[in-house]
């Protein structure tokens, strides 16, 4: 009995003490909230910038240390991300952990390089890496981007990124681009990553959403702008889409991702004024793809609900059915024209689509092999695409009618 | 351990060590003085002044007699009014027509519950139980009249099982009062009250109550057998008895429970449980029990369906919080920091920077402080009681935080755990959870959430395997038996027709057939 007891005891000790190595107190860890990846100066080296949150700033009153900065930023040049993580330990007292890493910023230069696919592909080997981490491509080197980004409202950097990344749901200016979806689309199909910049080169556009990050006419505040998207194909950046194009590429997907978005259009009744509307989509788009004919035929119907937000021309749409019809027709035509332009651009320049239409096309084939032989992206480049927007006016704003200024005196 | 158990339960029951056994079994003699002298010797008179003797002459038979009783055990007013006065007032009878001892007992004494006795052992037994013994000169029998008048307090409100809505009677130390409280709830002629005597040196009567038409006969026999097997010189309270009759005295899981509410005891009786009552114990012992008996309160059934179930959901949440939250906290911050929001993580990490101890020690420090405070709160005299309590714990916690001994979030964790623990209705369950919490802490310290999961699996497996008086602990949920599903939630009263079949009741349905079937 005692002999078995000994063995049992040892077995249990092995079982229970096995976990002790993994145990680490919170204050012994350095929580990286954002990393930036850039091309190194030499060979295949990369520069990795770690932004490490300081738990003693703005977290809890008992821990407040007012003179310290909210985050520590360290840049290490190393062959890959994990080597950099290890090497950073030479200057950091605490153990670096990626368990709260939700933002990965990649400099455009690295994103366009051959090396990028390998760098990001090997990063996922680290089990601490979160697949829902957002991928942002920055116009300038990621190191500069992280240093330049000093938002006033969110002192702690993770909060800033969390809010900015949540914004896309309400604006559609940037796509949802996490690591998980990136790894799903590393072939001919296009992956859209959020595009950001901390360098301002303001331009002024007639349309409210045709900007690319950095171009938005902004006078003061945080220099970082996040609008538009970087197009990645075969794990490399090949081009950019501006805010408007990014919105269309989100709208043309089967499933809706955006809660609502605001856009402005020229008023069909008085061309000199613009009309600002809010779109929302509650139903899925209908995508019909005919792969039997050549070139393939793609029919997309996008149902949209529209709410009039501001009405500079002060036209009364509420009581005039004809005006409403005219408005709907003009908006539909404009949306269709814009999306046709986008598709033409994609077909000619990139020969791929970011709309996840391949999922709809795949249904037409019995086996995966047949679909692969078909070569969807090649076929898409030639396909006839017919896009239809079906718009329904949901409301005319809080105040049903615009004010009637002329009649006031009478 | 088994040796200890053997020693605990063996004893030498063959040899009658009872103090009453040492009293000579002699019959009374015809001489009054001899009888009195013998009784005085048995009660160590005159060293011991407890035995009171009142001499008198009974006119009806014109003989001298002595009335004996024990001060404190018998009610002197009752003896005056119902024994001495009628005896003295009896009319002298005609010659040759004098009443016998039975005649005096039946026709002169105005006290109910009198019997004739013939030997000293019985006389001593009657006297110590508060009876009055009347010895008559020239008679070989004596009269024992029931004049028990032990001091008792009046029926008060429950102190442990408090309800907002519902009856507010609680058991008291007098078993007769307790029985009357149960009978008042349960007006059924089949409510059986059997008496079993336990304790060798100073025997106490234990009343075994059950409903003859419902309770499983085998269960009743089982309980009585265990009572008879108890071999101790004296058992003063039900709490001591509880430990002697339960199956697993070392287990954290209780196999009996006590209640101080007559309504609760009655509802257990109606489900086929056995209720034990004992003099001097202001509660009733219920056997067998299941997890549900520990988890439910009387109020669940008094409140309306939705309100009662809401309380149960809260209690279930409280159970899990009390059991697992400190362990989960420890697991999260030492093994799985990715599980909590970044803000919270940074807040904890920030406050922990200046704490000199590892998280486990920090947790144990505060947890033990809280347990000490709770223990102190129970023992502290009432006038000081208000200064201690949760407030005291929190102030202490606050000071500990300022001294950087613990982090502030931990005070919240411990406070919510302690509070949840107070929400658990049964003292057995509550203490069990308090102890198990430390087990979970160690498991979390060793293996994180994996450890908690393993410990919880082991706990559930053990709990599902044990039985209380033959009834599985989680029945009728697991193993499944037909019941009215009054488990985590309760159905509306109209649907609570079926008694839990795990109790093997003789009658399955609660509803009596139309027109009151009777037996």
Image (cartoon, coloured by chain):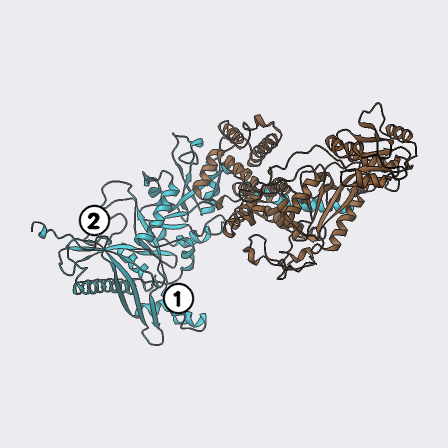
Chain colours: A cyan, B brown
Instruction: Point out residue B367 in the picture as x, y percentages from the top left corner.
Output: 58, 35
Instruction: Point out residue B68 in the picture as x, y percentages from the top left corner.
Output: 82, 31
Please, what secondary structure does the residue beneath circle 1 have?
A: helix
Q: Seen in the image, is A262 located left or right of residue B398?
A: left
Say which residue appears at 73% left-offset and 31% top-offset. Answer: B77
Does residue B339 sit above or below B63 in this rendering? Answer: below
For the residue pair A316 and B55, the one nearer the viewer reads as: B55
Q: Name the residue under label 1.
A: A359
Quarter of the image for residue A309 reads bottom left
Task: Mark yes or no: residue B240 visible.
Answer: yes
Q: Seen in the image, is A33 located left or right of residue A332?
A: right
Query: What is the residue that sits farthest to the bottom in this orientation?
Result: A293
For the residue pair B335 and B63, the one nearer the viewer reads as: B63
Which badge, 2 or 1, is on the more N-terminal residue? 2
Say which residue appears at 45% left-offset and 38% top-offset. Answer: B346
Badge 2 crowding class, 10 Å Cα cut-off, few under 14, some 14 to 19, many 20 or more, is few
For the residue pair B383 and A92, the one nearer the viewer reads as: B383
Does residue A374 sit above or below B88 in this rendering? Answer: below
Instruction: Point out residue A244 in the picture as x, y percentages from the top left corner.
Output: 26, 56
Quarter of the image for residue A342 reads bottom left
Quarter of the image for residue B82 reads top right
Query: What is the residue that sits farthest to the front in this orientation?
Result: B94
Badge 1 crowding class, 10 Å Cα cut-off, few under 14, some 14 to 19, many 20 or more, is few
- In the drawing, what numbered circle is on residue B127? none
Quarter of the image where the N terminus of chain B is located: top right
Say which residue appears at 39% left-offset and 72% top-offset. Answer: A374
- In the drawing, what numbered circle is on residue A203? 2
Task: Mark yes or no: residue B232 visible.
Answer: no
């Amino acid at each position: 009995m005692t002999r078995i007891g000994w063995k049992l005891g040892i077995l249990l000790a092995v079982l229970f003490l096995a976990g002790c190595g993994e145990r680490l107190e919170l204050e012994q860890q350095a929580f990286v909230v954002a990393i930036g990846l850039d091309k190194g100066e030499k060979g295949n080296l990369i520069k990795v910038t770690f932004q490490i949150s300081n738990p003693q700033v703005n977290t809890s009153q008992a821990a407040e240390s007012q003179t310290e900065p909210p985050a520590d930023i360290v840049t290490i040049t190393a062959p890959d991300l994990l080597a950099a993580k290890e090497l950073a330990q030479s200057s950091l007292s605490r153990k670096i952990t990626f368990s709260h890493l939700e933002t990965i910023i990649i400099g455009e230069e690295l994103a366009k390089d051959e090396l990028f696919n390998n760098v990001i592909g090997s990063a996922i080997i680290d089990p601490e890496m979160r697949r829902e981490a957002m991928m942002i491509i920055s116009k300038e080197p990621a190191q500069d981007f992280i240093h330049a980004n000093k938002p006033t409202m969110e002192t702690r950097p993770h909060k800033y990124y969390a809010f900015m990344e949540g914004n896309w749901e309400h604006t559609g200016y940037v796509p949802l681009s996490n690591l998980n979806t990136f790894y799903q689309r590393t072939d001919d199909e296009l992956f859209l990553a959020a595009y950001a910049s901390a360098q301002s080169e303001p331009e002024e556009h007639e349309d409210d959403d045709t900007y690319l990050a950095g171009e938005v006419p902004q006078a003061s505040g945080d220099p970082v702008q996040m609008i538009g998207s970087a197009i990645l194909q075969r794990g490399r950046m090949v081009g950019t889409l501006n805010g408007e194009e990014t919105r269309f590429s989100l709208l043309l997907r089967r499933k809706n991702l955006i809660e609502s978005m605001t856009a402005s259009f020229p008023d069909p009744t008085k061309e000199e004024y613009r009309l600002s509307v809010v779109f929302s989509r509650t139903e899925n788009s209908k995508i019909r793809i005919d792969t039997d004919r050549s070139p393939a035929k793609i029919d997309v119907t996008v149902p949209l609900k529209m709410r009039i937000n501001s009405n500079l021309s002060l036209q009364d749409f509420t009581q005039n059915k004809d005006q409403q019809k005219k408005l709907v027709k003009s908006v539909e035509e404009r949306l269709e024209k814009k999306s046709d332009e986008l598709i033409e651009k994609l077909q000619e320049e990139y020969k791929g689509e970011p709309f996840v239409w391949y999922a709809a096309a795949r249904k037409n084939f019995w086996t995966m092999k047949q679909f692969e032989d078909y070569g969807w992206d090649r076929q898409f480049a030639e396909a006839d695409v017919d896009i239809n927007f079906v718009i329904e006016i949901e409301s005319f704003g809080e105040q049903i009618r615009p004010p009637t200024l002329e009649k006031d005196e009478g | 351990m088994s040796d200890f158990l053997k020693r605990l339960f063996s004893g030498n029951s063959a040899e009658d060590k009872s103090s009453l056994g040492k009293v000579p079994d002699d019959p009374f003699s015809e001489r009054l003085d001899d009888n009195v002298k013998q009784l005085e010797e048995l009660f160590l008179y005159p060293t011991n002044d407890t035995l009171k003797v009142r001499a008198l002459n009974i006119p009806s038979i014109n003989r001298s007699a002595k009335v004996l009783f024990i001060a404190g055990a018998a009610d002197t007013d009752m003896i005056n009014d119902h024994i001495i006065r009628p005896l003295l007032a009896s009319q002298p009878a005609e010659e040759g027509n004098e009443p016998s001892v039975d005649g005096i007992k039946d026709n002169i004494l105005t006290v109910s519950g009198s019997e004739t006795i013939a030997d000293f052992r019985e006389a001593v037994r009657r006297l110590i139980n508060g009876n009055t013994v009347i010895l008559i000169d020239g008679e070989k029998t004596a009269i024992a009249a029931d004049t028990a008048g032990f001091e008792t307090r009046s029926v008060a409100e429950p102190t442990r099982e408090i309800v907002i809505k519902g009856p507010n009677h609680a058991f008291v130390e007098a078993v007769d009062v307790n029985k009357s409280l149960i009978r008042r709830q349960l007006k059924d002629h089949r409510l059986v009250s059997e008496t079993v005597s336990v304790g060798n040196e100073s025997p106490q009567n234990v009343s075994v109550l059950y409903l003859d038409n419902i309770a499983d006969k085998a269960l009743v026999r089982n309980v009585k057998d265990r009572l008879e097997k108890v071999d101790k010189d004296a058992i003063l309270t039900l709490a001591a008895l509880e430990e002697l009759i339960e199956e697993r005295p070392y287990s954290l899981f209780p196999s009996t429970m006590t209640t101080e509410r007559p309504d609760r005891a009655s509802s257990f009786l109606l489900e086929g449980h056995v209720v034990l009552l004992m003099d001097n114990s202001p509660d009733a012992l219920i056997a067998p029990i299941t997890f549900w008996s520990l988890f439910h309160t009387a109020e669940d059934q008094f409140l309306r369906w939705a309100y009662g179930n809401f309380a149960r959901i809260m209690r279930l949440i409280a159970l899990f919080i009390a059991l697992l939250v400190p362990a989960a906290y420890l697991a999260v911050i030492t093994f799985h920091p990715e599980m909590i929001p970044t803000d919270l993580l940074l807040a904890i990490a920030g406050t922990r920077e200046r704490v000199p101890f590892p998280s486990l020690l920090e947790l144990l420090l505060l947890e033990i402080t809280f347990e000490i405070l709770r223990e102190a709160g129970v023992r502290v005299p009432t006038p000081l009681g208000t200064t201690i309590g949760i407030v005291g714990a929190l102030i202490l916690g606050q000071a500990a935080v300022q001294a950087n001994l613990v982090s502030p979030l931990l005070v919240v964790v411990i406070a919510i755990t302690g509070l949840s623990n107070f929400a658990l209705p049964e003292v057995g369950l509550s203490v069990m959870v308090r102890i198990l919490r430390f087990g979970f802490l160690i498991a979390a310290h060793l293996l994180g959430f994996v450890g908690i999961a393993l410990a919880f699996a082991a706990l559930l497996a053990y709990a599902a395997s044990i039985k209380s008086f033959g009834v599985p602990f989680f029945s009728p949920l697991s193993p499944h038996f037909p019941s009215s599903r009054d488990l985590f939630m309760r159905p509306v009263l109209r649907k609570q027709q079926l008694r839990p079949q795990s109790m093997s009741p003789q009658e399955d349905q609660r509803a009596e057939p139309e027109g009151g079937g009777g037996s």
